[in-house]
Image (cartoon, rainbow, N blue to C red):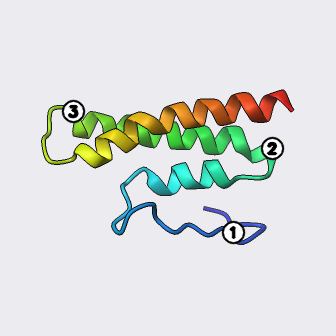
Amino acid sequence: MSAEPYPINLQPLTEKPYAWEEHYVRAVLEIDDSLLQQRIRVAEKALISRAGELFGHQGHSIEIQAADEAPCALAMLKRERTMS
């Protein structure tokens, strides 16, 4: 992973970050339009991978809910940033 051109606060959304969370946060906080699509793709792949791991497992309801909502937020980010 290359060095960031600006500092990013990657504080996890929870005390123990989910496997996909760092990628999601990087995408949401990306300000460079030339990097945004790549960050979103990486976050989406991480979410899909984790969703496969979570399928049928119990005891991960909070993460499952967060992982269900994250793709909607990424889609909204894509729409908003490509419209401007």
Q: Secondary structure at mark 1?
A: loop
Using the numbered discs, state the Cα–Cα distance from disc 1 to disc 3 in whole angstroms: 34 Å
Query: Where does the image place residue 76, in percent across and percent down from the top left?
Result: 64, 31
Residue underneath mark 3 = 55
- The numbered disc on residue 19 is none
- The numbered disc on residue 3 is 1
* Other residues around mark 3 within 10 Å, as few (<14) / some (14–19) / many (≥20): few
Q: Secondary structure at mark 2?
A: helix
Above or below: residue 22 compared with residue 75? below
Whether pointer 2 and pointer 1 mark residues with C-beta atoms closer than 8 Å, the reply is no
Identity of the amino acid at label 2? Asp
Identity of the amino acid at label 1? Ala
Whether pointer 1 and pointer 3 mark residues with C-beta atoms closer than 8 Å, the reply is no
Identity of the amino acid at label 3? Phe
Instruction: Judge depth for marks 1 and 3 and give the one in front.
Output: 3
> Which tag, 2 or 1, sits closer to the chain's start?
1
Q: Secondary structure at mark 3?
A: loop
Residue underneath mark 2 = 33
Quadrant including the N terminus: bottom right
The residue most toward the right is: 84
**Nearer to us in this view, 35 or 81:** 81
At 66% across and 41% down in the image, what residue appears?
38
Query: Where does the image place residue 84, in percent across and percent down from the top left?
Result: 87, 33
41 relative position to 62: left or right: right
Query: Where does the image place residue 4, in percent across and percent down from the top left?
Result: 71, 66
